[in-house]
Image (cartoon, grey):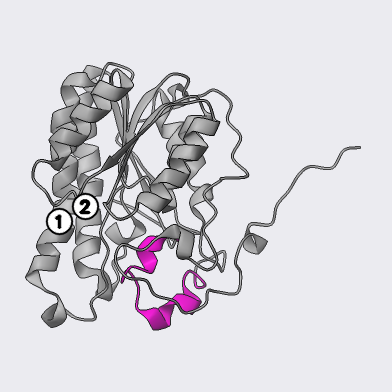
Amino acid sequence: MTEPNLIDPRKLYETDGFPKQDQETPALQAKMTPKPDCGEESYVGTKQLENRRVLITGGDSGIGRAAAIAFAREGADIALHFFPGEERDAKEVAEYIQQAGRKAVLLPYDLREETAPKEIVQKAVEQLGGLDTLVLNAAQQISQPSIDELPIQQVKDTFTVNIIAMFALVKEAEPHLPAGGAIVTTTSVQAFHPSEHLLDYASTKAAIANFTIGLAKQFAPKGIRVNGVAPGPIWTPLQLDQGQPIDALPEFGQNSLLERAGQPAELAPVYVFLASNKASYVTAQIYGVTGGEAINL
């Protein structure tokens, strides 16, 4: 009798923490130790997103990279937004997209620039021939030990990149999105259980969760579904780019119920599902991929 293919989730990936490390902004996945698993070698598509035209923000590394690789292998063409300076990572993702036989459009933009959302959507539509799916994933996360050490300019930048840009991108994309299209946002477990050193970041993630559900109510009459994913501690460049205190990195994710940090590849199937026709009766939902930490809104 053939045995089932069972994998103990506690024993996947890095179970003993991570070495101390730091990078200058912007942090690159190519320089991380160990490199995150974004499904480069493991993700196998089944044509769930055949001929879809997808815009992914923050798609050069981490969760966005995993989503881009998965979406391409599911049959989608990808417009890949990334922060200028992250070209090395973005070009690697483009190669994986092209190896899957799909089109890759690279869009280097700083979302703090007011004109960026409009230009991103315009170029995505022009070069993909349309747009039916958004994965709004780009984020800034900078750890500060207390509010008196938190620069107000950082607060403004974090809100601009993480949530205001989402409003702007959706406003620009709405005229192009057809019935059957989908929007998937990236919120966070921080929206529900904020860490004291991520005051501004956690606040934006709570705003994203609220935005996601409110937008879903607006877009349901248009036949467009809107859902969010709330990751827990996931090993991405965001953590090295001042996203965590350096001394905390060795224990990053070790206090989850599964006793390890998650990898971007473990989130990609959730993004695929929420974008696909298989989720035809799923909207206004937040899916937690947290290693066990509860989320509620």
Q: Which residues are magenta?
A: 235-255
Relative to 53, is 183 above or below?
below
Q: Nearer the viewer, residue 57 or 144?
A: 57
- In which image quadrant can residue 9 be found? bottom right
Q: Is residue 2 magenta?
A: no
Residue at label 1? 159
Whether residue 153 can be seen here: yes
Q: In this view of the protein, which residue sits in the foreground, 210 or 148?
A: 148
Look at the numbered discs 2 and 1 and tell me whether their residues touch, using CB distance below 8 Å: yes
> Was residue 249 drawn as part of the magenta stretch in this picture?
yes
Label disc, if present, on residue 162 of the rendered structure? 2
Front residue of 26 and 189: 26
Residue for point 58% across, 30% down: 45
- Where residue 145 sits in the image (x, y, percent)? 24, 81
- Image position of 270 (left or right of 164): right
Residue 288 can be seen in this image: no
Going by the picture, which residue comes out furthest to the right?
A: 1
Give percent across and percent down for residue 112: 14, 52
Amino acid type at circle 1 is: Phe
The answer for how far apart the CA atoms under marks 2 and 1 are is 5 Å
How many residues crowd around disc 1 within 10 Å: few (fewer than 14), some, or many (20 or more)?
Answer: many
Residue in the picture at 16% in, 39% down = 117
Name the image quarter holding the N terminus: top right
Element carrying mark 2: helix
Q: Is disc 2 surrounded by few (<14), some (14 to 19) or many (20+) residues within 10 Å?
A: many
Q: Position of residue 189 (x, y in %)?
A: 35, 58
Q: Residue 254 appears at what percent x and percent y?
A: 52, 72
Give the residue type that dot 2 points to: Asn
What residue appears at the point 23 percent right and 55 percent down from the top-left corner?
Answer: 206
Q: Is residue 269 above or below residue 158?
A: above
213 relative position to 68: left or right: left
Quarter location, residue 228: top left
